[in-house]
């Protein structure tokens, strides 16, 4: 069954703006991960945040995790046209695999 | 050097045929997966193998049969293809649950195999 739900489904912004995507999930987790998928390509891992962490940074990416609300957010700062892709959250609920949400399609216009 | 490679990238076939997709990883990972991505981009786990042993088998029709000859390879064979099997199939690998733990770490994905059943 689906665990994560991303919001919004689609996001369109201008280069230089920040993009925020949210993910909600249903059960307790070991960790939550974010992935990017460019059109016609495989998924690429961006960042992993453990259940005992609240915030993590990697370059222009900032991820927060609120286990009490069962939600996470991914912030991409100073977006670039090359950030155009679909972004997925995935949860590890201890079932020996990850469960993915439906993704947010991000379009960054020059 | 491609970490997770799967072939073929595109597969177009008729209903009722049997087809296979191959996957190989050179990362030395213990765990390999098959995911199915539908037309709405929803990714669903199908199978997971750890050191050649099946550990996850979601509610997938018996027409789908994975085979892992060694821990670097996980192939997917599909019998009697149906229209609804049209999708992109992704192979992935991970180091698997960390030693002594149950966490699933980063997954490394192949580029996908787009299957179209006519």
Image (cartoon, coloured by chain):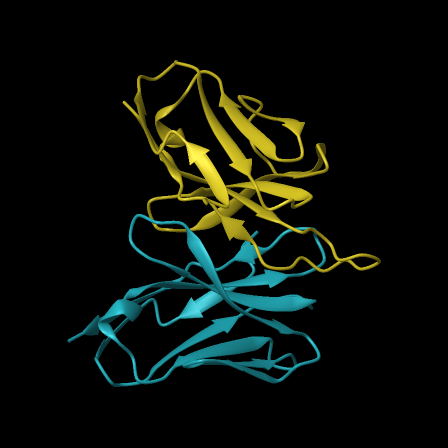
x, y percentage for residue B24? 53, 35
Measured along the vertical axis of the image, is residue B18 above or below residue B109?
above
What's the residue at 29%, 53% (across, down)? A39
Quarter of the view holding residue A55: bottom right
What's the residue at 52%, 27% (across, down)? B76
Viewed as shown, does residue A5 lie left or right of B104?
A: left
Front residue of this view, candidates B84 and A40: A40
Front residue of this view, candidates A24 and A82: A82
Quarter of the view holding residue B67: top right
Quarter of the view holding residue A76: bottom left
What's the residue at 62%, 84% (across, down)? A54
Picture colour for chain A? cyan
Measured along the vertical axis of the image, is residue B21 above or below residue A84?
above
- Residue furthest to the left: A110
x, y percentage for residue A66? 60, 82
x, y percentage for residue B90? 46, 41
Viewed as shown, does residue B109 lie left or right of B71?
A: left
What's the residue at 40%, 49% (across, down)? A42
- Residue furthest to the right: B100
Front residue of this view, candidates B74 and A31: B74
x, y percentage for residue B85? 40, 30
Image quadrant where one finds the C terminus of chain B: top left
Viewed as shown, does residue A18 lie left or right of B33?
A: left
- Chain in yellow colour: B
């Amino acid at each position: 069954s689906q665990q994560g739900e991303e919001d919004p489904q689609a996001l369109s912004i201008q280069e230089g703006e920040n993009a925020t995507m949210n993910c909600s999930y249903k059960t307790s987790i070991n960790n939550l991960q974010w992935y990017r998928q460019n059109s016609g390509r495989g998924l690429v891992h961006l960042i992993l945040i453990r259940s005992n962490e609240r915030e993590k940074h990697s370059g222009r990416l900032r991820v927060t995790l609120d286990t009490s609300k069962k939600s996470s957010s991914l912030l991409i700062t100073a977006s670039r046209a090359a950030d155009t892709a679909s972004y997925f959250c995935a949860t590890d609920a201890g079932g020996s695999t990850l469960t993915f949400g439906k993704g947010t399609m991000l379009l960054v216009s020059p | 050097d491609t970490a997770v490679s799967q072939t073929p990238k595109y597969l177009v076939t008729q209903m009722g045929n049997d087809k296979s997709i191959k996957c190989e990883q050179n990362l030395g990972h213990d765990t390999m997966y098959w995911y199915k991505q539908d037309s709405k981009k929803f990714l669903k786990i199908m199978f997971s193998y750890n050191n050649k042993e099946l550990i996850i088998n979601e509610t997938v029709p018996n027409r789908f049969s994975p085979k892992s000859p060694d821990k670097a390879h996980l192939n997917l064979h599909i019998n009697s293809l149906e229209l609804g099997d049209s999708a992109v199939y992704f192979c992935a690998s991970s180091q698997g649950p960390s030693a002594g733990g149950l966490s699933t770490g980063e997954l490394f994905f192949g580029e996908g195999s787009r299957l179209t059943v006519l």
